[in-house]
Image (cartoon, rainbow, N blue to C red):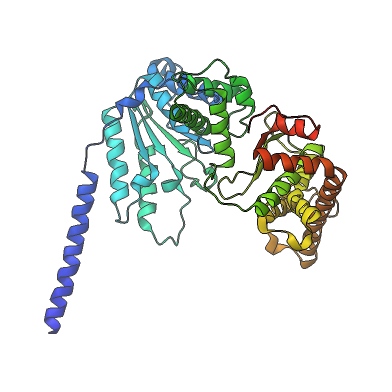
Amino acid sequence: MWNTIRFLIALFLILSVIEAQLQMKMTTNQKEILPDSVDRKFRFNDVQGVEEAKEELQEVVEFLRNPNKFKKLGGKLPTGVLLIGAPGTGKTLLAKAVAGEAGVPFFFCSGSEFDEMFVGVGAARVRNLFAAAREHAPCIVFIDELDAIGGTRITNDHQPYSRMTLNQLLVELDGFEKSEGIVVIGATNFPEILDKALVRPGRFDTKIDVPMPDVKARYNILKVHLKNVHVSDDVDLEVLARGTPGFSGADLANLVNQAAIKAASDGDPAVTTNHLEFAKDKIIMGPERKSAVITEMNKRIVAYHEGGHAIVAYYTPGSLPLHKATIMPRGQALGMVSQLPEADQLQWTKKQLLAKLDVCMAGRVAEEVIFGKENVTTGASSDSQQATALARAMVTNYCMSDKLGMVQVKDKEQLSPETQALIESEVKKLLTDAYERARNVIQSHAKEHRQLAEALLKYETLDATEIQLVLQDKPLNRQL
């Protein structure tokens, strides 16, 4: 019996090793690694809003086009270029445009493709990738989501296969001559977690930031995405670009696509301003839930709640301009007030942050003033959460507390109990003061608050111009 058990255990181990080796071989040899020729159609003109990044990458294009021009002066081809930026800013499109401008093969892969549970599979894929690149040199190897395999190595890591993959990548980056013409472009949203050996000079030694687009960049991006779309004459791209702060290139592409779908669904021959505004509201505030059943009482509470937000935003100095107010359920919210800056906000003043606190508190204050404290609802929970997080950031990160002074708090566990109590006291004071300021605004503009709430009950959605007309007690030229 014991001999039989030992034989079965040994047979199981041998078969497991054979199966792992076969799977590794099948995985690595599943298909020949070939460059993606389709991506050569992209050019720098297809990438807008990142002019500085394109200037940096123009050197790589010149190296690939005419390497002898730089070799005469002793210049060497850069080994690795790291693109750093938020999601949707166009890092992948930039890499494709470099290949298109230089006219060289483009190898695309994602960091997750090298992540396997079998030891050695990821490293083998890295070797195969660079072997194929050497055969098609000069070329570009693009590794998207580089942080998936390039994270900082830990000595007691229980996943040795990930370390082997990274080690193999480091070896390959050092394993080819500069004259081979292989440029590795990596992209990541988290550069701070990359291993130091990966970003040292000689590997990914060129770091390029790909920022979010400003208003001029958004205008150019919209022109690119709308060039193949039938657009009516009433569309003003400058107004649309100013009204989409914080939108990435991917968001703008989605906006144009949603507007085109809406126009096609309505049977219109071209995309109009209304279609683009509908798409923008859908991205900012979420899709409308027209099928939601809301009682008249709840609808009235929501109208006065959102009217409170709008009133305080309108009459508070430093507050962002109103964009729209609605009591139509969107996403998880029963209503919403949207604010958009007139220009890109590169930094915030204390006055603007205090105004944001006042606007956050206004919904709960409006419910208390109109319906009484015993009838307040849970609708202000997200407002309270946002206000508390902002107040805490003002105290601990932005050093906007007079009592705490210029002390930036990073690790709360190392603070003394007295300092923690002082922080909580300052956060509470900011919220309490904002609450009182919001109450004063709503009580002093009670008439306007009631008019705005009644208009929301009647029309459900009001834009900035209509809100201003209501507050000035002027009629709305609008059909129900």
Nearer the observer, 230 or 183: 230
Location of the C terminus by quadrant is: top right
| Picture quadrant of residue 77 | top left
Report the residue at 61% width, 22% height from top.
216
Q: Is residue 138 above or below residue 169?
A: above
Residue 12 lies, in percent from the top left, at: 17, 69
Report the residue at 79% width, 43% height from top.
449
Q: Is residue 269 above or below residue 370?
A: above
Nearer the observer, 68 or 146: 146
In the shown orientation, is residue 450 left or right of residue 478?
right
Location of the N terminus by quadrant is: bottom left
In the shown orientation, is residue 8 left or right of residue 193?
left
In the shown orientation, is residue 341 left or right of residue 146?
right
Residue 216 in view here: yes
Residue 213 lies, in percent from the top left, at: 58, 29
Residue 97 lies, in percent from the top left, at: 42, 24
Q: Is residue 288 above or below residue 298?
A: above
Q: How many marks?
A: 0
Report the residue at 80% width, 49% height from top.
406
